[in-house]
Image: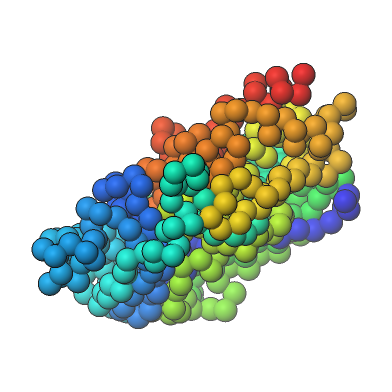
Amino acid sequence: MRANYLFTSESVSEGHPDKVSDQISDAIVDLMLAKDPEARVACETMTTTQRIILSGEIRCAPMYDAKNPEWAENGGWAPGAKEEIEKAVRRTVREIGYEQEGFHWKTLTFENHLHGQSSEIAQGVDASGNKDEGAGDQGIMFGFACNETPDLMPATLDYSHKILERLAADRKSGAAPFLEPDAKSQVTLRYESGVPKECTAVVVSTQHAKGYHEGEKEAELKSYVRGVVADILPQGWLSDTTEWHINPTGAFEIGGPDGDAGLTGRKIIVDTYGGAAPHGGGAFSGKDPTKVDRSAAYIARYLAKNIVAAGLARRCTIQLAYAIGVSKPLSLYVDTHGTCTEGITDEALENAIASIDKLGGLTPRGIRMHLGLNKPIYRQSAAYGHFGRQADGDAFPWERTDLIDDLKAALA
């Protein structure tokens, strides 16, 4: 590993068009899981000027059953189900804050093209006889943790997220009424001996009310953003040499889906580790937890975070691999990048993880049972990163650090 370098990560706000799509897709996942904890959902969302389109596959008996003769006239939907889905979509857009001419929660056009899950996919995933529930798809998933921040996340990404979270909170509270929902941030840090020491550049582009791109109003907006960044970053990281780019292209009045189309699953690096760790390529939002793209990435983060939180390593990457319809992972790989505590090896950590019974062999069912993933907890994960968040009740269970004692006992 290089010891001295510059590294950059970006984040996007809840009002970014791709993030609007992610949040809508996860609102549908939550709606289905609230009706049926065993629901299957693969929901894709497209957003554009005054239009939202849903597509994908579902299996949720209280909401949809193509074989129910009483629901045939409604295309297999239960009475009121389509209306409930539309309400969830519009409510999500309203909570984000879009009440603009080009994208308004109340007046936008909505299309629902969800349909039943393929029986051929279901036969591979469902448990039957002596067959355990299989993975919902093949693929590789990664988890990561490091000791750069209290959240055990890469500092560049963690602070990029927090800048935009503050902007959103101030917009919604009225503290910064000139802000609109769409925004992006980017933080570049200088590392010495692998430790972040200084912020060399900050980029923040935020949608704004009319006129805040020139004169005194522009100065007010830029001063506000500088103040937020200074409050978020650790003291001493900003200096006279820090490079600032606040709305560098000028006016940013047209934003969100009116300014650019949005799709579910296009911000996978923002959602994970900001480029500081590998990514298997699968997106999270819109997928129920039988899809290992989601659940295995969550358990991999959980394992990596607990290893770092336990003081067993300063940095940890974990890879898992699955085959569709097969319950057990094909491989488990641990890499602590040479930061293991003396006397501990990566192979020992792999063996320790494999020996912990409560993890259920890292099968899709075992992951969901251990983390409690069959719950409507996903909409809140769909903006500002799925990782580095606060575990609270049912929310973000993969951020708990309750495996420390088990790991230490398995290594003893």
- Foreground of the two, 232 or 29: 29
Q: Is residue 109 something that shows in the picture?
A: yes
Point out residue 251 in the picture as x, y percentages from the top left corner: 48, 78
- Foreground of the two, 376 or 181: 376
Point out residue 364 in the picture as x, y percentages from the top left corner: 52, 45
Name the side, left or right, on which 257 lies relative to 100. Answer: right
Q: Which residue: 71% across, 23% down? A: 410
Judging from the image, the colouring scheme is: rainbow
- Above or below: residue 387 compared with residue 339: below
- Above or below: residue 334 compared with residue 224: above
Q: Which residue: 23% across, 57% down? A: 63
Q: Number of numbered discs present?
A: 0
Q: Which residue: 24% across, 61% down? A: 64
Name the side, left or right, on which 283 lies relative to 74. Answer: right
Task: Name the quadrant of the C terminus.
Answer: top right
Q: Which residue: 60% across, 37% down? A: 361
Point out residue 239 in the picture as x, y percentages from the top left corner: 73, 53
Q: Is residue 165 something that shows in the picture?
A: no
Point out residue 96 in the picture as x, y percentages from the top left corner: 35, 60
- Foreground of the two, 410 or 24: 410
